[in-house]
Amino acid sequence: MSDDERENVGQQFGRLPATPADREVEGRASREEVIDFFAERFGIDPAVFAEFTFWEKGKGKIWIFADDAPTPIRVEGLGMTVLRTRQEHWKPTQSAIQRFGRHATKNVIEIDGEAAAAFVRGEDQELDWDGDWGYLIAAHTVGVGPEGRPVRDGTAVERGEREPIGVGLYVYGELRSTVPKGNQESLSPLSTD
Amino acid sequence: MNPLERYAPLVDDTDAFFEACERPLPSVVRVNTIKADPERARRALDDEGVVYEPVDWHDGLLRLPDASPGTNWPYFHGWLHGQEEVSAVPALALDPQPGEKVWDSCAAPGSKTTQLSAMMDDRGVVVGNDNNLGRLSSLRHNAERLGVTNLVVTKQDGRNFSLKPLGFDEFDRAIVDAPCSCEGTIRKNPDTLDQWTLEHVHSVAAVQKGILSRAVQATKPGGTVVYSTCTFAPEENEAVVDHVLDTEECKVVDFDCPLDSVSGVTEWEDDSYDSSVTDTHRIYPHLNDTGGFYCAKLEVTA
């Protein structure tokens, strides 16, 4: 085995080992740990990720790829960024949550109207939340037509009609938007009537 | 002199051609079916009161006459991507299938690349190559926003592209949407002709021949290669196809162009081209009220 395969090299992608026991690059997350993270934190069924491979480029930046490739591989991009590891609290990316967050069954905070618009502008806001602190999926209802909209008393919409907006950090009664600056936008609040 | 004057002999209705080139182009978005179906995207635009018009030949394309395509909820969710109507044609001509390996030699900023991924249900591999780091960064940004996971991004000179890092040695299909003199984008960029010179046309044609040759070589026998530009110049269109017909193992195949088009030309100034280039398509702005475009479909024969 070459040094490239044992070390994490910044300019190339290395495939994640299947389990921690298969680990050869120090500190590298395993495929099992990544899938467990999404299952434990957001209730996303591991089957959702069955057809994908996971890769690390740079320290802790995990990418998800629809196919397989030789490891290590020197290219500019391999699929989509999905997760930041090698820090105390792993953080899913905006793109991962927008793509896979529909499968989430927990730690999803529903925000509508002006709250959703403020989140997309990148603003922090005080909100009630009974669940865990930490990274949450902020979601709202969009594009479901009149019959699918929630009624005023807050009846939950069917899962699947709820669309993830991005990743929020909930601490001390406050939802902090982590929408990347390049994605922030001033949008009209959607009517919830 | 307006460089477009040189194409008057090729165009049936020159008045309509020059008038269309003067008119601004409407904003068009493509629905990103990796994330949403066209019906849901339309409902989301309705929710926000954004006016759109369907495009009759493609249910995933919507014209937005009044709005900036980037400031609405479905765009934020990555359900929509700004893409000129005519530029949706080459991916349809290529017809990539889920699970295949496809090369996009000049991919950035990625409208066609991400359209290929969506047509493949985001399975298999699209290798999106470009030689410019700044343009690659917009390709990466767009692919992330649209939730594309089957894209490998490479930075190489397309003329001598190496598959060695990829772990396979041929593509099922390839698309060369070549850098060109961009005359067909005049409606979007009115000053695009200020820089126009015949020398540039000839130098960019040499690059186009190099990239298209490499695409044919890198594609398996029986595979498909699509060549497209947004210029009217035969030097950059039929002459490039004619060159690879001579030098590489391939033939022109016809395809159903979803927009009104006219046949490629077999004669231009002192040159003549292989008769099969009449199966390639020229799309002039006045034919469908779009930008100008050229598209050829090739089959690799050995």
Image (tube, rainbow, N blue to C red):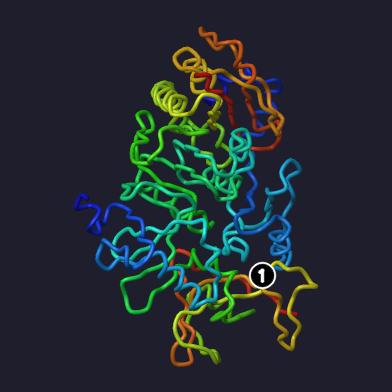
Q: Judge from the rendering whether residue A94 lies leftward or rightward of residue B288; answer left or right.
A: left
Q: Amino acid at mark 1?
A: Gly
Identify which residue, B128 or B58, lies in the foreground: B128
Residue extending farthest front:
A21
**Dot 1: within a 10 Å radius of its alpha carbon, few (fewer than 14), some, or many (20 or more) residues?**
few
Q: Residue at x 47, y 46 (%)?
A: B109
Element assignment for label 1: loop
| B2 w.r.t. A30: above or below | above
Q: Position of residue B23 (x, y in %)?
A: 64, 39
| A61 w.r.t. A159: above or below | above
Q: Residue at x 54, y 89 (%)?
A: A127
Q: Quadrant of residue B286?
A: top right
Q: Position of residue A181 (x, y in %)?
A: 43, 68
Total residue callouts: 1
Residue B233 visible within the image: no
Q: Position of residue B264 (x, y in %)?
A: 62, 19
Residue corresponding to mark 1? A160
Q: Position of residue A52 (x, y in %)?
A: 48, 56
| Chain letter for the residue marked with disc 1 in the picture | A
Residue extending farthest left:
A3
| B54 w.r.t. B50: above or below | above
Q: Judge from the rendering whether residue B109 lies leftward or rightward of residue A156; answer left or right.
A: left
Identify which residue, B132 or B183, lies in the foreground: B132
